[in-house]
Amino acid sequence: QVQLEESGGGLVQAGGSLKLSCAASGRTVSNYAMGWFRQAPGKEREFVAAISWSGIDTYYAGSVKGRFAISKDNPKNTVYLRMNTLKPEDTAVYYCAARVSYYSDTYYLADDEYDYWGQGTQVTVSS
């Protein structure tokens, strides 16, 4: 079993930055692809960013591309989401997710492709 714990959320003004962390425990996630999703009030959970187990390949939702950056530190068993130029529409609960990916160094975009989820961290962007 893998446990994921997000941190780094908070309240920030539009145009500001935040860096979210997702620390894994229970197992090493060196061979796990990771992803970030978010859910705003009254909306469905949506994909934000994903990274392959090696960290080489990444993919972003169009709404965050160029502003957000996902990275993975395998020795620290942690994945990060750096968020720049934040907008009020980025307000949501952000979740990290993980899935084992032994045979393919790729990323995954759909939430039903992930096996493990964190509890989420709130990000609020004020205008």
Image: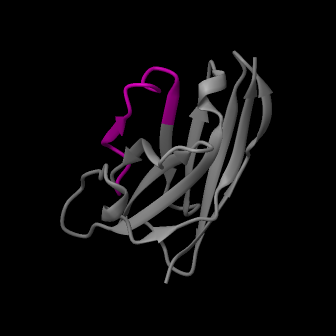
* Image coloring type: one colour
Q: Is residue 36 above or below residue 76?
A: above
How many numbered tags mark residues here? Answer: 0
Estimate the x, y position of residue 105 in percent, counting from the top left. 24, 56
Q: Is residue 14 left or right of residue 3?
A: right
Q: Position of residue 32 (x, y in %)?
A: 38, 65
At a point 44% along the width and 44% down the height, the residue shown is 46
68 or 120: nearer the viewer:
120
Residue at image location 39% in from the left, 72% down from the top? 115
Q: What x and y, as percent, mark residue 62?
A: 37, 26
Give 102 or 61, whichever is nearer the viewer.
61
Task: Judge left or right: residue 5 versus residue 68.
Answer: right
Could you say which is closer to the camera, residue 48 or residue 74?
48
> Principal SS element in the magenta part?
loop
Q: Residue at left 30%, top 42%?
A: 57
Q: Which residues are magenta?
A: 53-69
Q: Quadrant of residue 125?
A: top right
What is the residue that sits farthest to the left in this orientation? 103
Position of 71 compared to 122: left or right? left
Q: For the view shown, which residue lies furthest in the front direction?
A: 42
Q: Is residue 83 above or below residue 107?
A: above
Q: In the picture, which quadrant includes the C terminus?
A: top right
Give how far across and how far down residue 87 sits, in percent.
63, 21
Residue 64 located within the stretch drawn in magenta: yes
Q: Residue at 18% x, 67% y: name it.
A: 103
Q: Is residue 101 magenta?
A: no
